[in-house]
Amino acid sequence: MAEEVVLMKGNEAIAHAAIRCGADGYFGYPITPQSEVLETLAEEKPWETTGMVVLQAESEVAAINMVYGAAATGKMVLTSSSSPGVSLKQEGISYIAGAELPCLIVNVMRGGPGLGTIQPSQADYFQSTKGGGHGDYRLIVLAPSSVQEMADFVGLAFNLAFKYRNPAMILADGVIGQMMEKVVLPPFRPRRTEEEIIAQCPWAANGRKKGRKPNIITSLELDPVIMEQRNIHLQAKYKEIEKNEVRCEEIQCEDAEYLIVAFGSCARIAMKAIEIAREQGIKVGLLRPITLWPFPYDEIELLSHHIKGILVLELNAGQMIEDVRLAVQNNIKIVHSGRMGGIVPDPDEVVDDLKEKLMK
Amino acid sequence: MKEEIIISGFGGQGVLSMGKILAYSGLMEGKEVTWMPAYGPEQRGGTANVTIIVSDERISSPILSRYDTAIILNQPSLEKFESKIKPGGTLIYDGYGIIEPPTRKDINIYRIDAMDAATEMNNTKAFNMIVLGGLLKLHPIVSIESVLKGLRKTLPERHHHLIPMNEAAIRKGMEIIRPHE
């Protein structure tokens, strides 16, 4: 069958992709600008076709704890929200990371802090990549910059989450969630059978069969000696993820004298800014981190030897720029460009910043 | 081919759906398309706008600084976007919504009295399709056939009887658009 190209919003693509990836359940609570995820699932009624559960919980806290419970049984489950809602989920996310359970959390970011605004933002970079909840844990964080990637990253996030028994996050924003683009949805994959889940997730608490020891899912360990061992195990796992799973895209970097580092919607704006700048003879390229954790430190370090300076474009006061500074070992100029509180810069503003802040 | 368009007016004028129809028609022709709405409080009564890009190649930013074409359906939108049209670009405005007409000399300005025409047709809901017809007369970005195909694909079957009315509205728009004096 030929691939069907459809036009839809990023949020809708998340919902369709989840059904097609064979997800077992979605638990969520509506909030702008991500409500279409839940709305689309409600319209599609996957419980009538694949048997996927779709549940509007009484709150974000309830939703993430439903994810915790379902993930503990080896089910493939997800939740989605936007910034204030994802803050509410942080306790649950820390528990899920501590209990080493696979799941997907989608954050379609809006401006904060607090209840903030419903307009796009990338101000949850720190929250997503450096913690958010308590304890030494990491999320695998994927940053889509198109509707196609919203669809593609659902399957990728689940694969990584199950491969490493670790929660994964899709970190999008209001631009990517609300815009419509062409998308080829992933092929339908049936939900795993109970036998397949048992085979894939021997750790899952899904009913003890004769001869097997009970599986206990918990993040609690009162003996600090054992708890430290757990932390050491987690850190070893994170090292493995850092070694294997860094993803980024380099655009027009071959002859670049300047570099823009940007993710998600900002990477798209940067691409236009680069078109404009190159028309004016400014040789600038883009490095787009696709995984925000693990972060492409080595790739940026490598590029930093061939360029005069880096502009970090992000919809916040300067968060990812800290990782770019960690990556770069020499003393080339690194500056921030971006707007806050839901304002999205246009490509001309970025070109102005490139000239004013970086090239001067 | 690449056409970067802003459509801006009051919430409820069909701004977003006009953009959606345009994007769908582009899709029907195998083009790259991006539809980026202002989804904020504008949608709830103030001005609504949507950026549509139709292109033969991969589209970079859904957020633009300047536009090839602006379709302006109320005064606040004119004030916001007149200066953001590329020199040599196109501005289409609805005569009913604009009190202070545009003044730039380095762009092509057209007027379409779509609100009046829709009232005459006894169908104010046809307003946005009349405007779309005006745009397609000036810039045949997509064919009428693709628009109708897009409508057939996106409208639920129970609304398919409205497609001929939409076609009539597009043709009306093509007829009545005229250079701004």
Image: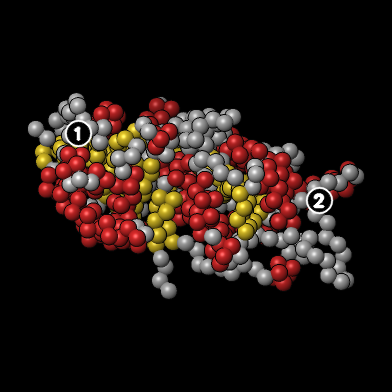
Judged left or right of residue A81, residue A199 is: right
**Neighbour tally class for label 2: few under 14, some 14-19, many 20 plus, Cα within 10 Å:** few
- Foreground residue among B64 and A228: B64
Q: Chain of mark 2?
A: A
Residue B56 vertical position relative to residue A327 in the rendered view, above or below: below
**Neighbour tally class for label 1: few under 14, some 14-19, many 20 plus, Cα within 10 Å:** some
Q: Chain of mark 1?
A: B
- Foreground residue among A273 and B150: B150
Q: Which residue is mark 2?
A: A218
Which residue is depicted at the point 28% across and 31% down?
A: B77
- Foreground residue among A152 and B160: B160
Q: Position of residue A46 (x, y in %)?
A: 56, 62
- Foreground residue among B147 and A328: B147
Secondary structure beneath dot 1 equals loop
Residue at the outermost left position: B181
Which residue is depicted at the point 57% across and 31% down?
A: A115
Residue at the outermost front position: B122
Which residue is depicted at the point 42% across and 54% down?
A: A8
Q: How is the image coloured?
A: secondary structure
* Residue type pointed to by label 2: Thr
Q: Position of residue B69 (x, y in %)?
A: 23, 41
- Quarter of the view holding residue A214: bottom right
Which dot, 1 or 2, sits closer to the camera?
1
- Quarter of the view holding residue B110: top left
Q: Position of residue B116 (x, y in %)?
A: 17, 39
Which residue is depicted at the point 36% across and 47% down?
A: B35
* Residue type pointed to by label 1: Tyr
Secondary structure beneath dot 2 equals loop
Q: Which residue is mark 1?
A: B96
Residue at the outermost bottom position: A1
Judged left or right of residue B116, residue A289 is: right
